[in-house]
Amino acid sequence: MDELREWLVGNGFKIYANNDKDNLCDWYAGRRAETDKECGCNDHPPQIIVKPYIIAMNDGNRYKSVEVELVGEDYGLWWNFSVYSLSPKELMENLGMIEERLVKAWELK
């Protein structure tokens, strides 16, 4: 996941500590979405959050996957739009399209 982390930083993401004890990846990444529609709770655009996972299974194998979320408050309700079960490669190849579609879902009236 080091390559993914470096790629995300190079694409404007900030890295934050992950405290999920079941996830062997100790970080996640975030940046503000490019949208004029602000989150109702703080008057800022919502964030795009990238959550990489490394999960150790009982059989000794480790599985890697990535989720991308756009989370924000609108109309007094919290919304969570997401794409999940991506490989790091799929994320790097498709982040632009994924972010565009998450933002379009967020901007619906």
Image (tube, rainbow, N blue to C red):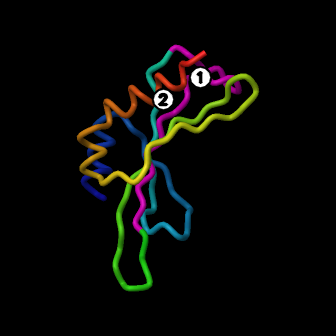
The amino acid marked with disc number 2 is Arg
Is 27 drawn above or below residue 93 in the view shown?
below
Residue 9 colored magenta? no
The residue wearing badge 2 is: 32
Determine whether, in the image, residue 8 is placed left or right of residue 105: left
The residue at the far right in this view is: 76
Is 45 drawn above or below residue 68 in the view shown?
above
Q: In the depicted view, which residue is nearer to us: 9 or 56?
A: 56
Crowding at dot 2, Cα within 10 Å, few <14 / some 14-19 / many 20+, comes out as: some
Q: Look at the numbered disc 2 and give the secondary structure of its residue.
A: strand
**Marks 2 and 1 in Cβ contact (< 8 Å):** yes
Is 53 drawn above or below residue 6 in the view shown?
below
Residue found at x 47% / y 25%: 103
> Over which residues does the magenta segment extend?
36-54
Residue 17 in the image, given as x and y percentages of width and height: 50, 55
State which tag comes first along the sequence, 2 or 1: 2
Residue found at x 54% / y 19%: 107
The residue wearing badge 1 is: 44
Residue found at x 56% / y 16%: 37
Measured in 3D between alpha carbons, the distance from the residue under mark 2 to the one under mark 1, in whole angstroms, is 8 Å
Residue 58 in the image, given as x and y percentages of width and height: 44, 84
Is 43 drawn above or below residue 64 in the view shown?
above
Q: In the depicted view, which residue is nearer to us: 84 or 48?
A: 84
